[in-house]
Image (spheres, helix red, strand yellow):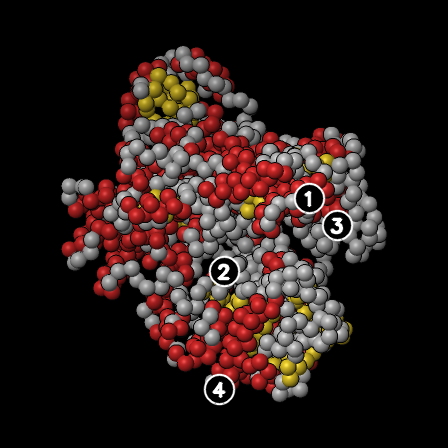
Amino acid sequence: MTLDPLSRRAFVERAAQATLGVTVLHGASSAARAAEAAAAASPTSGPGFGKAKRVIFLQMVGGMTHIDTLDPKEGPTQGPVAPIATKAGFQLGGTMVKLAEQADKISIIRSMSSKTGVHAAGQYVIRTGYEQRGTIKHPAIGAWAQHFQGASHKTLPSTVCINRQPGAGNGFFPASFAPLPILDPDAGLQNASFDAPADTVQKRMALLDKLDGGFRDRFQTLPVKSYTEFYENTMRIMSSEDLKAFAIAEEPQELREKYGMNKLGQGMLLARRLIEKGIRVVEVAGGGWDMHNDIEGALEDKAAELDVALAALLDDLKQRGMLDSTLVVLCSEFGRGPKINGNGGRDHHPKVFSTLFAGGGIKGGFVYGSSDKGGFEVADKQVTIQDFLSTVGWSLGLPVDEVVMSPSNRPFTVGDKGKPVLELFA
Amino acid sequence: MKTFTHWIVSLTAIAGIAFAAPVAPPPSAVAAPAAAPTTAPAANAVFRVWTDNQGRKLDATFRGLQDGNIFLQVRDGFVHRLPLAKLSAEDQQIAATLKPEGLGIPTDPNLAQQAAKIDFLVNGGLAKAGQKPNPLATDEQFIRRVYLDIAGRIPTREEALEFITDSSVSKRAKVIDKLITSDGYKSHLFNYLADMLRVSDEANKARYYTYQDWLKVQLNENVPWDRLVQQMMTADGKLLDNGATGYLLRDAGMRLDNLSLTLSTFLGANVSCAQCHDHPFAEWTQHEFYQMAAFFGASETYGAKGSGKGMANKEMRQAIMSLPDKRLQQQAKNIARVNGLQVVDTEENDLKLPDDYKYKDAKPGDKVAPKLITWGKNDTHLRSYQEVKTKEPSELRDQFAKWMTSPENPRFAMTIANRMWKRFFGVGVREPVTDLDDVNASVNPALLQHLASEMVRVKFDLKAFTRLLCNTQCYQREATSFEPEAGSAYLFPGPTLRRMTAEQAWDSCSTLVVGHHVDEFKSWRGDKYAKAMSIDFTNPSTLADQITNAMQSMRSNGGGKGKANANVSAKKRRMMQQQQQPSMADEDADFRTTPPMLGGLVLARASELPQPEKDQHFLRQFGQSDRQIADSGNDEGSIPQVMMLMNGEAQSVISSNGSLVLKTATEQASQEASIESLYVSFFSRKPKPTEVAAAKEALAAGLALKDLTWVLFNTREFMFVE
């Protein structure tokens, strides 16, 4: 029997699964994976590969209008605010006043295209690269990175998501790969303070160790041990300086205001705090972009929040010397229609939209691809969502071509076989 | 010695009791003592030859004495009950001194034999690999496990004590019989199926309450699995009128996704790859997948168009547009959409190959004729295949359902049997349960085949099957305390040590706080919802009022988006919290309609709470499925989860003054008794002297009993099922 690399690994994993009676992702499969990696020789070098050690993944929820932000148009589709010039030579939407001053730090892809015009499905695809299915969960970029590169911190989780639910971001990887959710950046981590005075907590923990000792000795199984580890880690975080990573109140008031005193601004500031403490991937969600009605009024709030926060973030990272090693990505599930509708808003538009990259070896002041004159269709160099996510993976140094088998024996890759847009890298 | 069968007959005769003879002649592998002289009945090698007062002999093992009868189990597992006085004087004396073998006596001699067959196959698998079964579980281990496994929660302190202090030899069998008829059994099975079927309050902008209610009714009536599944596959009409349509309508407009789930869920056939391309490992091609899908090619589930009572769409649109404001119009449209969710059979099978079909055997866009997949060359000779004949499009779905749920389908019985086995033993005989593939590659093919045939024998009665599994000795063994070596098969020396499911953990927390009352509240939401959604669009003058009333009714029914919390209105909840008294203190409270509450938590079974619960709820933090992915409830830990266990609402309510577990412990006469009370409540066992000493020492050093509840709640011993 001869098997191609894919089938061979599937075979090994299957055998392991059958004999262990449990699903196997690591361990038993690593030998097969190594064998295959050698055979397939996934490209692991090239421009920008692995330059980013961390990622801040900004996802605007609702469908960010590309024409009013990153891909401005003049003429009938222009929208409420006229484009503005930037120091990098290209124009930005008139709402991006502060970002225009940082344009030398960013690259924009103006030829993104998606097949999905439905919010939840679109959000799922741009987060994972795969369409939603009832049979499997697909990992987001943080879980992929943890799979290939291990945990990024000894106590803190490797991925955090801010202003959103974790939404099975670990995909088919273990739950320990799931992003830790911070639903409100001001409130920080939930249930993180003890429900009793410190000395009571100490006595409780001591008694817990004594009373549970017999059980833990008797059942030295992996799940029991891993729970004991979770308790140890939780105690360690709760009583360590690490917990402060989540305490945004520790930041100077002036800086907090510079990011903007709203969930998106504070979320980005918290993201910076967290990557500074060693968390690898932080997702920040920003809502309110589903502008079917009165886009002018909606932009006044939402675009201004994004503009202020993103400019502050890039500046902050630069000043701390972290921008070169931190990839900042801005995306949304789709763009919005060039035509202003009867309610003064724009409707869903997946055919063409824009994303933004900065830091992590990305060129400054660069635009890749274009939409047509009105912002209706891709005019040049179409980039799929899969390409977009592969680019993020590439920047982080992930082997984006390497096939990983899920516990259900199905093959997956970072960004579902997309091609990294290498032109973005300096 | 006289012959085996002769003995049974004659003993039955002398006993003067109408024994049910073994239903079928035992399979030779089991019956022949030569084949397995020391392994059957399971773990009971102590056979001796018993003699009655007329000199007749029986080779059997001693299982115990009760009410003047002796219980003797022969090698095929059958247990005989005989008046002790009929034995020879010598054997009567021996019986009085012997320690009973095994785990007491069964309530049903046939059941004992059927359970013994399973034990025989498990033990055979272990013996072949040179492994030994685990020791038998203690009563304390058994009672906690069997409550969690059958009724989905820990026993209350009283329930645990009742069992432990019961001295009858048949108490294990009796408690199994009690639990399978309990409310908890239905609740626990509902949770399992809700995860498997992705039962969700909300999908396609509608509430699927009628579907949940329908499923609960099926479980209440113990409808056999084949009939239950068949109903889901063949249901017609509106979601609001016929909850059984919920299965197909869960994936309205996505019949390929739905079929892919149907095959993996009910037949253990993983064809999700073949949905997009030929299956890379197994045999199935994309074409074959579409041939299966063609059985649903004449069934319409896309209901977004909406429809009113007997109205054409155009008229209804006009009625909606005549409403005074946009909000009402939107609400009316939503209600019309809900009414439009229905399964309708059409005259034409319209399934076609996809536009990107790339194989040579057919072209993109080709029509596809229905054809059944097979697992083996001879499958098509089976009756389940032979019976599929009609080519009438409107009957395709019925034909498929009949084939799928047939006892002669090669995988249907095996899939549910394997799933049920996993529920009680922690691991399937074949994993994953959604991909049985080659049965011979399972860790114990003979066991898997036998479980499938048992499922057929009990006619897909899941209650009977549960009873059977729980009566086996392999189930009643200690949980495995070692980590199976990498690369070695788990052969079921006993159940694995499992972390409680999210639902078991939540229901157990609630049990600690409110005791057995936890089982009383039942959430029926389907009828109210269907009534609220039943709008007469032909009467424009009252339409606005109808819509307003419907929305009002939804809100007061706890149906408001994101606010759904059992059937308790937000106002009532606030009032209850303000009173700062748990409603359980109110003796007149009818918990069947209003669940007990404490500290803002609704202390009802997970099956009666929103499906799924909201993200921050204990259930979700502890791994309840989000109901987007089938079988995705998980038992893994996380830092936020542990923070919740240490500092969250549940621990705070359990250790609050209104909590039953703390109240009961506080009422005890001595500190030792209080500690013991907490131990029995949490672990269904009494504390060891060292544990009492450690607890007393901590109490003396400043901790209170509420701290001790916190400690016990946070032990691994609490959250794992031994």
The reply to whether the C-beta atoms of the residues labelled 1 and 3 are less than 8 Å apart is no
In the image, is A316 to the left or to the right of A96?
A: left
Q: CA distance from mark 3 to mark 2?
A: 38 Å
Around disc 3, counting alpha carbons within 10 Å, would you say few (fewer than 14), some (14 to 19), or many (20 or more)? many
Q: Residue at x 58, y 57 (%)?
A: A137
Do the residues at pointers 1 and 3 share their chain? yes
Q: Position of residue A297 (x, y in %)?
A: 57, 68
Three-letter code for the amino acid on which mark 1 is drawn:
Arg
Question: Which dot, 1 or 3, sits closer to the camera?
Answer: 1
Q: CA distance from mark 3 to mark 4?
A: 57 Å
Q: Say how many tags the image has.
A: 4
Q: Which residue is mark 2?
A: A165
Q: Which residue is mark 4?
A: A319
Do the residues at pointers 2 and 1 share their chain? no
Q: Which mark is residue B285?
A: 3
Three-letter code for the amino acid on which mark 3 is drawn:
Thr
In the image, is A394 to the left or to the right of B687?
A: right
Q: Which mark is residue B317?
A: 1
